[in-house]
Image (cartoon, rainbow, N blue to C red):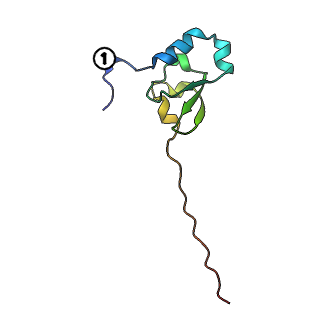
Amino acid sequence: MPRSIWKGPFIDKCLISKLINYSNEELKKNPIKTWSRRSFIIPEFCGLNFEIHNGKTFYPLTITESMVGHKLGEFSSTRKLCVYTKTKKKKKS
């Protein structure tokens, strides 16, 4: 179920504090590391670099205007693509 409209978007407190504490130049140079995949992307995040944890590693992401309104976790996949290859049969000699 989606979040109720009257509650508004959820943004983790650590992300808000990082936006307030750092200047714009520092935020654009150094990516923000976050484990909060459930946080919504707001317009103030546009142009910033994030590193989103996908359970194993941090996935780099630059926020654009088309991403506003989505969650951070939508842009870092947690599943690894598994491809099975066929083995070649050996010839009997």
In which quarter of the view is residue 69 placed?
top left
Residue on which the image places disc 1: 6
The total of numbered circles placed on residues is 1
Q: Residue at x 63, y 24 (%)?
A: 31
Classify 82 as above or below 52. Answer: below
What percent of the width, then of the height, locates residue 7? 32, 17
Q: Amino acid at mark 1?
A: Trp
Split into 4 quadrants, where in the image is the C terminus?
Answer: bottom right
| Side of 50 where 12 appears, left or right | left
Q: Secondary structure at mark 1?
A: helix
Instruction: Tell me, yes or no, if residue 54 can be seen here.
Output: yes
In which quarter of the view is residue 5 placed?
top left
Classify 85 as above or below 50. Answer: below
Q: Residues within 10 Å of mark 1 (few under 14, many from 20)?
A: few
Q: Judge by depth and name the residue closer to the eye, 45 or 91.
A: 91
Q: Residue at x 48, y 27 (%)?
A: 36
